[in-house]
Image (cartoon, rainbow, N blue to C red):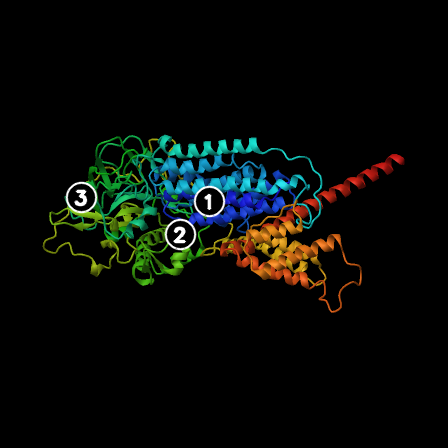
Amino acid sequence: MLETRPRVALAAWLATMGSAAALLPLVKDSGWLVQAGLLLAAQTATGMVARRLGAPAALAVAAQVLVSLLLVTVSTVSAYALGGLLPGPEAFGRFGELLSAGAEDIGHYVAPAPMTDGIRLMLLAGVLLIGLLVDVLAVTSASAAAAGLPLLALYSIAAGVNQEQAGWLYFLAAAAGYLLLLLAEGQERLDRWGRYFTGPGPARGYGYGQPAAAAPPAQSAGPRLRAGRRIGALTLGAAVLAPVLMPTLGEGLLDLDGGGSGTGTGGPGRISSVNPVVALQDQLNQPQNQQVLTYRTEGGDPTGMYLRLVALDEFTGSEWKSSRWLENEVPGAPWLVPGLGPDVAFQEMTTVIEASGSYAQTSLPVPYPAVSVMTDGAWWFDRGSQTLVSDNGRMTTQGRTWTVTHRQVQPTAEQLAGAPPAPANLASYYTQVPPDLPEVVAELAREVTVDAADDHARAVALQDWFAKDGGFRYNTDVSSGSGSEAIAAFLEDREGFCVHFAFSMAAMARTLGIPAQVAVGFTPGDRQVDGSYRVGLHNAHAWPELYFEGVGWTRFEPTPGQGNTPDYTLPEADRPDPARPGEEDTETAEPEAPENSPAPTDPESCDPVREAAACESEAPAAAGGSGGGPSPGPWLWGAGAALALLTVLAAPPLWRERVRARRLAPGAGATAAWQELSDSAWDLGIGPLAAETPRQTATRITTVITLDAAAQEAVHRLATGVERELYAPAPPGAGAPGAEPADEGPARDVRTALAGLRAGVGRGTRWRALLLPRSAIRVTYRMSEQRLRAARRLRERRTAFLGKLRKA
């Protein structure tokens, strides 16, 4: 039978959390560590309960794995689980998506990275896995020294990824946890020394004068302790040297040289972001509008010129993301502009953009639509975003200058209103919505556009509803979720920033059959005295783009008070008059032969126009239905898990109170009172010794803790009373006339002695004795004895049954 070993199990939990703390500098949000600690505590408690019930090692570990899986499911993919708890095929599929996304995020971000769903899953699952290994090695296998290896692996990840921030404080936390684990195992071995003489568990009646039973001589623990010290020293030495000897593990979050790119601050004042959606909120909330770009434009007015960084064309239900249709060869200029027809006016402009030394991005921000980008280096062409990207992350915008030739398309409201339907394959791809999109999104879209006669009017109605008529408030402190539930919550709360407005309008447009995507980049910035424009962090922005055949991707501005409202969405009276003095006449240049979408050169890439069937969204449907707002399931299960954990933690003190009341009850006698005093002293740190007589135990108790005279007398009276009860019991009916009943004096002496003992120790010792009483371990001894007795009875019955069969 496995031993419960609560002290070692608790030390294993602390050691794992100490090592996991080294991961804190790698991500921005530290709240995950608290959640991981609670999940790991539930996993540890599951192992303790399973071992206490006498479960075999394999069954105890299986129970821990099952509970861990359920807790991770509730914490990360509850919307895809059965009843929000049980993982099914959809939940496991979502696990795979998150792990893949997390691996991609780790490869791109520098520390501290944003807390994406994928990274969060990897952190929680990783800590639980390491905690399970530590628990199995230290508790189940009784090899605390070997448990240092998974702890070392956990710390080495943090040290190898970020040597500078995984400093001595984190090393000391990890090392202290490991040393505490070794100490707990060593202390437990010392406490169990007497068990060699008494069988399973301490001898009954510790300190009651009962002679110890004979037992085999104890085996020397010296060689094992020496081996444990050697393993511990080797593990600590490797942990110290690992950050020094660990080679660079790659780019992004695993880039020790800081050359990778990611979201966060890779050094003082550095801004880097591969996933601009995640970085938007952080950039907008920066106290200073730090400069990231400057540019100068020739050939037109850049007042309404947005710099597009990436186009997000795929809506999976959990996020908007880019499909990254990349070509390793940049096509010759001019690039084809998807959907732009010959009847739409435009100005061809040239813009020279320079990035500051603090802005590191693997995609070049450019005005849309760009028809050529000139810069040095081996860049790839992103057809979906119409810009250049660094596929391996080795090149960034940091300190770089690039020249963009682009067109300022000037459609009229009439052209947009009269646009023919988009090609069927393009419309099919860009109007996809996930199956779990709440019905409220489509319902509100139809309600807002009920009076609109065409797609342009519907788009303008949606824009005006968000920007003016719907009662929305701009607030950058709202959580920047982009999934279906976040959109439904935004439509209900009506408070958020550009990400919420852009994602919601694009999703609503798709439900109306209008092809839509979301662009992320920067608003035009501020004009300087020399005619150049300065773009800062506060210009970071997201906006929806809707597709109109003959015009192409067309920008709309639903975010109130942010950016510039396009002229083609304004009422006719508010549009600028091109005939006013000072306005230049625009010349309509003849564009190159347009295509609805750029053609792929890589046969494995997904073209939304020519291969719409192959680009079907594979986002799993949520099992929870389409109701808006967050599901209460995770909260209910979390409350249940917390209640179960509290129940486990409250069991030892409740058991002690129950036993104390029974021992001090009228008629219990001096032996029960002495046992209560012995266990209470054990809870306060004075462990029982089987070889001592009651008088020797009383002398040790009064020597270790300074007691007042009344308490000392009570302790010695109890020792004398239990010896008299055991070895010289009074005959029935004996006793002095008027003497106090025999069952009242011992209980009162115990209370007097306990008051003195508690007054003689510190507050922390008293709290530990109350909440984590050491003597509660007797429960496991009793369970062990009961199991042995049950096994013995079963063997006797089997033997008797077999004997009867042989006689028959």
Q: Amino acid at mark 2?
A: Thr
Identify the mark at residue 17; answer none if there is no mark: 1
Q: Amino acid at mark 3?
A: Tyr
Q: Are marks 1 and 2 in contact (CB under 8 Å)?
A: no
Residue 589 in view? no
At label 1, counting other C-alpha atoms closer than 10 Å, the crowd grade (few under 14, some 14-19, many 20 or more) is many
- Callout 2: few (<14), some (14-19), or many (20+) C-alpha neighbours within 10 Å? many
Which label sits in the foreground, 3 or 1? 1
User: In the image, which disc is placed on residue 295?
Assistant: 3
Which residue position is annotated with label 2? 511
Query: Is disc 3 placed on a helix, strand or loop?
Result: strand
Q: Locate the N terminus by quadrant.
A: top right
First reached walking from the N terminus: tag 1 or tag 2 = 1
* Residue 449: quarter of image: bottom left
Which image quarter: residue 603? Answer: top left
x then y, percent, for residue 433: 42, 48
Residue drawn at point x = 11 percent, y = 47 percent: 530
Q: Are marks 2 and 3 in contact (CB under 8 Å)?
A: no
Q: Position of residue 591 (x, y in %)?
A: 21, 39
Q: Between 318 and 13, which is closer to the camera in this rendering?
A: 13
